[in-house]
Image (cartoon, coloured by chain):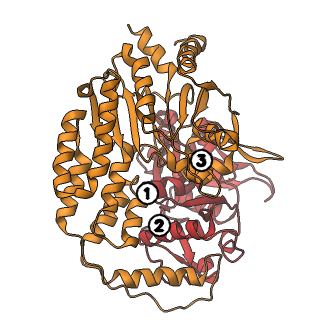
Chain colours: A orange, B red
Amino acid sequence: MIPKRDKQAIGQRFLQAFREAGAVEVAPDILLPADTLLDLYGEDIRARAYTSTDPLRGEVMLRPDFTVPVVQMHMAGGAEPARYCYLGEVFRKQDPGEERPANPRDNEYLQAGFELFAHDREADAEVFGLFHRLLTPYGLQAVTGDTGLLMDAVRALPLSNARRDALLHHLWRPRRFARLLARFSRPAEARVLPAPVAPWAGLRGEDEMQARIDRLLADRDAVPLDPAWNARLERLFAVRAPLPAALADLRGLVAEWPDLGSAVARIEDRLAMLSALGIVPGAILFDASHGRQTMEYYDGFTFSFVAQNRPDWPPVASGGRYDALTAVLGRGGRAIPAVGGIIRPGLVAELEAAR
Amino acid sequence: MIRLGVPSKGRLMEQTFDWFAARGVTLSRSGSDREYAGQVQGAEGVSLVLLSAGEIPRELAAGRIELGVTGTDLVREKLAGWRSDVAEIAPMGFGHADLILAVPECWRDCEDLDDFASIARDFRAAHGFRLRIATKYHRLVRAWLAHHEVADYQLVDSQGATEGTVANQTAEAVADITSSGETLRANNLKILGAEPILQSQATLFAHRAALGDVRPFLAQLGVAS
């Protein structure tokens, strides 16, 4: 067992490095109002975050991550560009399902984080470059992805708007996505809906149902998606290789799928910026499906640093671009380009102790 | 001494007594109907503990009773990692109930979980908050919906009269236990999908660490551990 004080000390080292990179240190609350988090993450967060109730403030949660309070703080009064850093505990519970795990995961651990709100296109490379530099001594594997690429791919499918929106919405839920895709690939079935038998009840309006029924009726005429698109999507999701090789695969896809061109060009730009920072692109993995396993609001570049000899560990560091989150949190849909990440000093302490 | 926990009242208690009587063990409540003490005849070293059915899972997991009768729904809902603490010995053939998801009967466009997921997404876009499901089975319902990758919903706690929440507009759907479905129909709700979230019945459970101690008694009852 490594004393918490030692993990704190390592966290302070990262915090100092973030300050030197121009970040202002912030100290968000530990008890956060539950409603914002629930609205953002849905019921999943209730399975992962500790909830409590305050007689006046209602349901509160022990901070499950820093992103939400930092974004809220910035949106309340910050101006871009802005760089913030923080160090503190996050709390996550684990619902084991039917059997208790032999080694439960930590339910309280430190995160040292860096968040950048900026409109320049170098922001992704700045954040990744910083994390890469700080983590170089630990021999971790960097894995990157780009959710924007996947979203562009779905947007480019020859589908009705309704079908396309449904796929985009469920991009982060692979099985539901696959079910939808399979349905869109079959000839549409004419649905026979039961006759109305019961009086109307509940908050969902009859007009809402009618709108959906109209959509279902319109969908009956939809042309099934050509299986070639399924095969292309599968090829895209399966791209996983060192960055230069992955880019070659992606360029191959662009020949058949020209709408991927601008996303692939963004990834190429990023590679050039990383090279300019002295990072060897061949040492970085690109996994097209990386972003599908992360938070729903990562909608662009994503990254994680994993300890390859510790497959049971979560990533030692992770992050990405989350413009979508700022759009949801900014009332009125005001989105701010934002990219950031966290390091887990506790895991770094374990790596140092194992040396 | 083997402590056997049994629901302290109602049909569940009577049927449990009948089940044991059919296996040669007479359970009875001592004294008046108001007294929660019991007697065991026909088995050595077994004592009867009368408890609320809802507390039996917790007492079993803690090992304060070695055997207990309760619904599979309560064990799975109340005990995270239940298999690590509790062993399922024998389904008892009564107390059947299904945990189901039900929506308003008037939702003609909602026939399966795919419809439900799609409606939840529309509802959230139209109303600015997630579609509400009233339930007291939070863990089971959440795990089941997560398994089916349904998003855009939220659970609201309902400890009773759950079927009324839709008409009262405090929820759009309910997840509750039903045996005949009558209360659901009376409230203009319909069960969604072919498979329930969970099929529950009264079941004899054992505290896992006490399995060795209870084996002779289980053999006497004619059930294997």
Q: Which residue is mark 3?
A: A46
Q: Amino acid at mark 1?
A: Glu
Tell which of B194 and B182 is nearer to you: B194
User: Is disc 1 surrounded by few (<14), some (14 to 19) or many (20+) residues within 10 Å?
Assistant: some
Q: Earlier in the sequence, mark 1 or mark 2?
A: 2
Q: Is residue B40 visible to the viewer in this orientation of the structure?
A: no
Residue A16 drawn above or below residue A158: above
Tell me, yes or no, if residue A136 can be seen here. Answer: yes
Residue of label 2: B117
In the picture, measured across the screen, residue A52 lies left or right of residue B200, that is right
Callout 1 touching callout 2 (CB < 8 Å): yes
Task: State how far apart marks 2 and 3 are (Cα).
Answer: 19 Å
Which of the chains bears the disc numbered 3? A
Query: In the figure, is residue B45 to the left or right of A99?
Result: right
Compared to residue A328, the image places residue B85 above or below, namely: above
Where is residue B133? Give x, y as percent. Answer: 60, 64
The residue depicted at 51 percent of the width and 61 percent of the height is B201
Give the class, few, some or many, for how many residues have Cα within 10 Å of label 2's Cα (few <14, many ≥20).
many
Q: Nearest the camera: B51 or A158? A: A158
- What count of labels does the image hold? 3
